[in-house]
């Protein structure tokens, strides 16, 4: 494995008395697509949110693209420009157009002029196939379109890695495909991605590695075929069996 | 004289009205000045307090919540009287106008801080997270993402609260401010006839109906485009 672009070591996280992450290690290589699966409450979303410090681990270390996210001297806002994130509930800014959503950070964080930001924003919307929706507000977009705008908002900053937190869970089934298609293209362009999701078909087709988490720990990881067809651990088997029945 | 004529002679006496309408008009200007000052300073300081509260500095917030709660609990008239009659004992002697302005602005500040704050907290956490994940700072997120959404939510309660407090300018009559009600009551005493009070009521309607209508317009104007 090449030098990892994401390197999380011995991460512990408590929410009050609840021990959510119990010493998790995760390395992700450049251009790798890692799928994180596991039952709800297993800590997979919390782990993902530690990778851009939306959650601060109680102990351990997180280094992304050579930046120690937990170091005092780290400018977290600069670091986050390199780490795109997509959320289950899209979280588009409802008071702005699609283009406004994409260009806000370009203008305020990346320091682009309004004209530069607009050009880059339109290019990002083009990549997700929504250039013609630039002037629409989130309320005028379908769920699938909204999530693609959210992806455009993240990739416009040209991040080194992308984090996806259940990007298709809030979508009607017929809209899932359009979002997965965009993710597949990102994958083909060589984007490093960590995806928390239960889209097994997509995992099988596109993931390099599947990580199974349960009870705040990584139980098992390996190639998609190995995890889905021949899981070694009983807990993995039980979980795979459950989601395959649906 | 029929009872209807007697009613008109008492409450809509043309001779009395003709004599006192310039006083009421002058009172209107005082009320407008007072109201504009109260609205601008009260809402601006309330917004600043709400933004400061968002910074989450505990001791500051505790003090703020205490002061805001006291100001919301006290009747505005009590605050006016405290300022007008109380401050001279520490060698500050504000005029009735300044006392009324300061008291109403403080009350509006307290209520609008609470309204702005509830708007800020009503913006979903995901909005903060999405913005912060793209590298915007706390302050940038507050100003560009959260506040615009919070302000839209706060427009209806803020409008009605602002109108309610602005009408409190009538309390200035207690500390000799010659606003509408003050002018009307002295005219009533001088003329032994309540007709100036009707003029005063008309003046309030002329002033505040446009404000209420404007408030409704602002509410529809800033509703979400679906």
Image (tube, coloured by chain):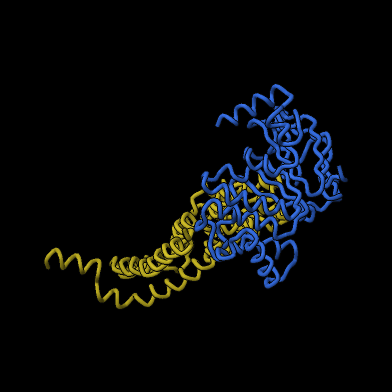
Quadrant for the N terminus of chain B, please. bottom left
Give the camera-side residue of A206 and B164.
Answer: A206
Output the letter for the chain in blue: A
Q: Is residue A65 left or right of residue B86?
A: right
Q: Farthest residue toward the top? A: A234
Output the letter for the chain in yellow: B
Give the camera-side residue of A89 and A38.
Answer: A38
Q: Is residue A240 visible?
A: yes
Q: How many marks?
A: 0
Above or below: residue A15 compared with residue B45: above
Above or below: residue B115 compared with residue A96: above
Query: At which x and y percent is residue B105?
Result: 55, 60
Q: Residue at x 16, y 68 (%)?
A: B5
Q: Is residue A17 visible?
A: no
Query: At which x and y percent is residue B224?
Result: 48, 58
Q: Is residue B168 left or right of residue A65?
A: left
Query: At which x and y percent is residue B69?
Result: 57, 46
Q: Residue at x 23, y 66 (%)?
A: B10
Q: Is residue B163 left or right of residue A232?
A: left
Query: At which x and y percent is residue A241?
Result: 62, 27
Q: Is residue A186 left or right of residue B193?
A: right
Q: Residue at x 77, y 29 (%)?
A: A22
Q: Residue at x 51, y 68 (%)?
A: B36
């Amino acid at each position: 494995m090449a030098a990892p672009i994401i390197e999380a070591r011995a991460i512990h996280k408590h929410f009050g008395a609840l021990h959510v992450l119990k010493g998790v290690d995760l390395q992700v290589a450049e251009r790798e697509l890692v799928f994180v699966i596991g039952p709800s409450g297993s800590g997979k979303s919390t782990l993902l949110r530690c990778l851009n410090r939306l959650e601060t681990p109680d102990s351990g270390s997180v280094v992304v693209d050579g930046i120690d996210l937990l170091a005092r001297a780290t400018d977290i806002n600069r670091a986050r420009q390199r780490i795109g994130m997509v959320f289950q509930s899209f979280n588009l800014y409802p008071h702005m157009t699609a283009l406004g959503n994409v260009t806000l950070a370009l203008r305020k964080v990346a320091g682009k002029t309004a004209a530069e930001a607009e050009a880059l924003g339109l290019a990002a919307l083009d990549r997700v196939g929504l250039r013609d929706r630039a002037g629409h507000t989130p309320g005028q977009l379908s769920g699938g379109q909204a999530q693609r705008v959210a992806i455009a908002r993240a990739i416009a900053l040209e991040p080194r890695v992308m984090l996806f937190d259940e990007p298709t869970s809030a979508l009607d089934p017929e809209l899932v495909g359009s979002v997965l298609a965009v993710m597949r293209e990102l994958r083909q362009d060589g984007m490093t991605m960590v995806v928390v999701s239960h889209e097994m078909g997509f995992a099988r087709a596109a993931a390099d590695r599947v990580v199974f988490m349960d009870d705040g720990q990584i139980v098992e990881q390996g190639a998609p075929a190995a995890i889905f067809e021949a899981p070694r651990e009983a807990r993995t088997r039980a979980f795979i069996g459950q989601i395959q029945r649906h | 004289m029929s009872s209807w004529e007697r009613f008109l002679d008492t409450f809509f006496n043309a001779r009395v009205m003709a004599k006192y309408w310039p006083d009421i008009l002058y009172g209107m200007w005082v009320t407008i000045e007072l109201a504009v000052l109260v609205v601008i300073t009260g809402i601006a300081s309330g917004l600043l307090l709400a933004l400061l509260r968002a910074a989450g500095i505990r001791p500051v917030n505790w003090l703020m919540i205490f002061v805001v709660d006291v100001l919301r609990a006290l009747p505005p008239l009590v605050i006016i009287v405290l300022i007008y009659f109380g401050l001279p004992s520490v060698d500050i002697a504000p005029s009735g106008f300044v006392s009324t302005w300061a008291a109403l602005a403080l009350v509006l500040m307290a209520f609008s801080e609470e309204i702005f704050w509830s708007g800020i907290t009503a913006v979903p956490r995901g909005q903060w997270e999405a913005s912060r994940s793209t590298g915007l700072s706390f302050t940038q997120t507050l100003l560009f993402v959260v506040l615009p959404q919070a302000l839209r939510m706060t427009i209806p309660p803020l409008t009605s609260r602002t109108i309610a407090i602005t009408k409190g300018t009538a309390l200035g009559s207690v500390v000799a401010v010659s606003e509408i009600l003050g002018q009307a009551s002295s005219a009533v005493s001088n003329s032994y006839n309540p007709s100036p009070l009707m003029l005063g009521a008309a003046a309030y309607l002329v002033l505040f109906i446009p404000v209420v209508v404007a408030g409704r317009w602002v509410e529809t104007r800033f509703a979400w485009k679906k």
